[in-house]
Image (tube, rainbow, N blue to C red):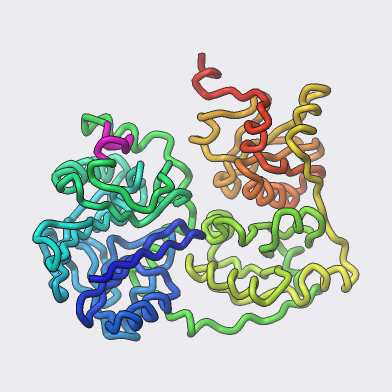
């Protein structure tokens, strides 16, 4: 048997290829499917089977394109309501591919149709070797229970508790856990950085598995849930129907500076994919900075509507194509195109450039000590609770779309995140909303703590 894990850092998404003999199985494929076709070809195999552990909400799956191009059958758990051609698989369903056996475990909770896949390599042992847990069980976390229209978060959390304790925790300790996501995913709250684990390790270290009672599990899983991005239900529906092939998308076209000016004047969207430093130095006023260097697609989906038809701004063709692919992975299929000649083209057309200052943490500390500073922390709640600067105001970036921070738009606002990526996005959104003087804190909270400056924790504040 051959086994490959493909990890897509931009979405913190893990997908899998399993091969035995001349047949291959793909689990939870990303939208651009060439990587699986090429890998199967290297092994001398053809993709015959595609499993979805659930209908993904945070990205568009390539299951339909794989099926169209290879003739593979798609397998999805019951209660999915999927219209794409598929076989609904129930608890105990087994697929035999050469010496490879895949057994379906129904594990509703993250979504009603969620399944896990128990893998046995019969060439080596009759005992199960690994379990592909999708979004049911992560390294250090479990899936969020608020993605269903049919069931309340409490009902799903109860299902999740039952699934974990009746199915996954009954597996042998040495079974390897391969989850559907890693750290940074929006499908959980505090996922670990490791890309695999074991049942034993999760039993001992995963906070959610330490909760003893079902009622307490439900309470903790449904308290202080992070905002659900607006695009999640849309992506789930795209996956329910089957997404069109990427090759069917139209070519990117150029947008002249004058046209972009009109688009922005009318409330349209432009996404600048350059680095935070480049954006701070010079940018198109009203554009949103989401650098390619981080979790670009997740943040684009969180902050920009899928039907917004954004214009891309980049320095080169490679970055434009990369951005286009990443956006397509979440269903943000561009129609408008990209700014002709980028920021330089904007300036040459006679339009004014925007900018904002950046400040190092030592200078920020001096400013706070001398005359105070309006400091905005845009990290997630769990990061803020673990430690923050005493004078800071907290407003997570993932809440900006619903409501901007309630601050004076004429006041100087220093913006901080963990390392400077999210704070640059926040600065661009604040400028777009009319804030006159925003300053990005270079290195963010990591640089602040490394320099030894004081922090407080949520527990200290509560006391």
Residue 110 in the image, given as x and y percentages of width and height: 30, 50
> Is residue 209 located in the magenta-colored stretch of the structure?
yes
The quadrant of the rendering that contains the N terminus is bottom left
Residue at 35 percent of width and 57 percent of height: 180
Query: Within the image, what quadrant is residue 251 found in?
Result: bottom right
Residue at 36 percent of width and 64 percent of height: 5
Relative to residue 320, is residue 16 drawn left or right?
Answer: left
Residue at 81 percent of width and 46 percent of height: 357
Relative to residue 439, is residue 417 drawn left or right?
Answer: left
- Give 352 or 273, whichever is nearer the viewer: 273
Q: Which residue sits furthest right?
A: 350
Q: Is residue 234 visible?
A: no
Magenta-drawn stretch, dominant element (helix, strand or loop) = helix
Residue 265 in the image, given as x and y percentages of width and height: 76, 63
Decide: is 329 above or below 85. Answer: above
Residue 113 in the image, given as x and y percentages of width and height: 24, 58
Q: Which residue sits furthest top?
A: 463
Query: Within the image, what quadrant is residue 40 found in?
Result: bottom left
- Give 41 or 299, whichever is nearer the viewer: 41
> Is residue 6 located in the magenta-colored stretch of the structure?
no
Decide: is 264 above or below 136. Answer: below
- Give 372 or 451, whichever is nearer the viewer: 451
Residue at 53 percent of width and 54 percent of height: 302
Relative to residue 228, is residue 82 drawn left or right?
Answer: left
Q: Is residue 68 visible?
A: yes
Residue 6 in the image, given as x and y percentages of width and height: 39, 65
Query: Within the image, what quadrant is residue 212 found in?
Result: top left
The boundaries of the magenta stretch are 202-210
Relative to residue 75, is residue 435 drawn left or right?
Answer: right
């Amino acid at each position: 048997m051959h086994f490959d894990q493909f990890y897509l850092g931009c979405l913190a998404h893990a997908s899998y290829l399993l091969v035995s003999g001349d047949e291959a199985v793909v689990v939870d494929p990303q939208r651009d499917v060439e990587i699986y076709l090429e890998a199967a070809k290297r092994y001398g195999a053809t993709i015959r089977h595609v499993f979805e552990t659930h209908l993904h909400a945070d990205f568009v799956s390539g299951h339909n394109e794989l099926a169209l191009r290879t003739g593979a059958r798609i397998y999805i758990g019951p209660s999915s309501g999927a219209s794409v051609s598929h076989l609904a698989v129930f608890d105990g369903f087994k697929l035999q591919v050469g010496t490879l056996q895949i057994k379906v475990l129904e594990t509703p909770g993250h979504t009603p149709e969620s399944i896990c896949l128990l893998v046995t390599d019969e060439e080596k042992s009759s005992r199960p070797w690994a379990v592909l847990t999708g979004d049911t069980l992560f390294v250090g976390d479990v899936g969020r229970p608020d993605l269903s229209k049919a069931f309340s978060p409490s009902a799903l959390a109860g299902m999740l508790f039952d699934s974990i304790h009746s199915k996954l925790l009954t597996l042998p300790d040495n079974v390897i856990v391969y989850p559907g996501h890693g750290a940074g995913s929006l499908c959980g709250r505090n996922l670990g950085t490791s890309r695999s684990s074991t049942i034993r390790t999760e039993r001992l270290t995963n906070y959610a598995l330490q909760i003893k009672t079902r009622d307490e599990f439900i309470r903790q899983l449904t308290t202080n849930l992070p905002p659900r991005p607006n695009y999640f239900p849309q992506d789930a529906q795209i996956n329910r129907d089957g997404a069109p092939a990427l090759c069917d998308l139209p070519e990117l076209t150029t947008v002249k500076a004058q046209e972009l000016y009109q688009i922005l004047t009318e409330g349209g969207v432009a996404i600048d994919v350059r680095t935070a430093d480049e954006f701070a130095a010079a940018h198109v006023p009203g554009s949103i900075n989401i650098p390619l260097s981080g979790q670009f697609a997740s943040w684009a989906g969180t902050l920009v509507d899928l039907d917004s038809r954004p214009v891309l701004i980049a320095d080169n063709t490679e970055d434009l194509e990369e951005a286009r692919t990443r956006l397509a992975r979440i269903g943000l299929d561009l129609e408008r195109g990209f700014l002709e000649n980028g920021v330089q083209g904007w300036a040459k057309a006679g339009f004014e450039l925007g900018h904002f200052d950046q400040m190092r943490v030592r200078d920020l500390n001096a400013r706070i000590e001398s005359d105070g500073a309006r400091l905005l922390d845009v990290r997630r709640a769990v990061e803020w609770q673990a430690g923050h600067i005493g004078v800071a105001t907290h407003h997570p970036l993932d809440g900006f779309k619903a409501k901007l921070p309630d601050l004076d738009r004429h006041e100087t606002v220093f913006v901080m995140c963990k390392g400077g990526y999210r704070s640059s996005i926040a600065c661009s959104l604040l400028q777009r909303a009319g804030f006159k003087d925003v300053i990005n804190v270079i290195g963010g909270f990591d640089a602040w703590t490394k320099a030894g400056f004081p922090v407080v924790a949520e527990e200290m504040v509560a006391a």
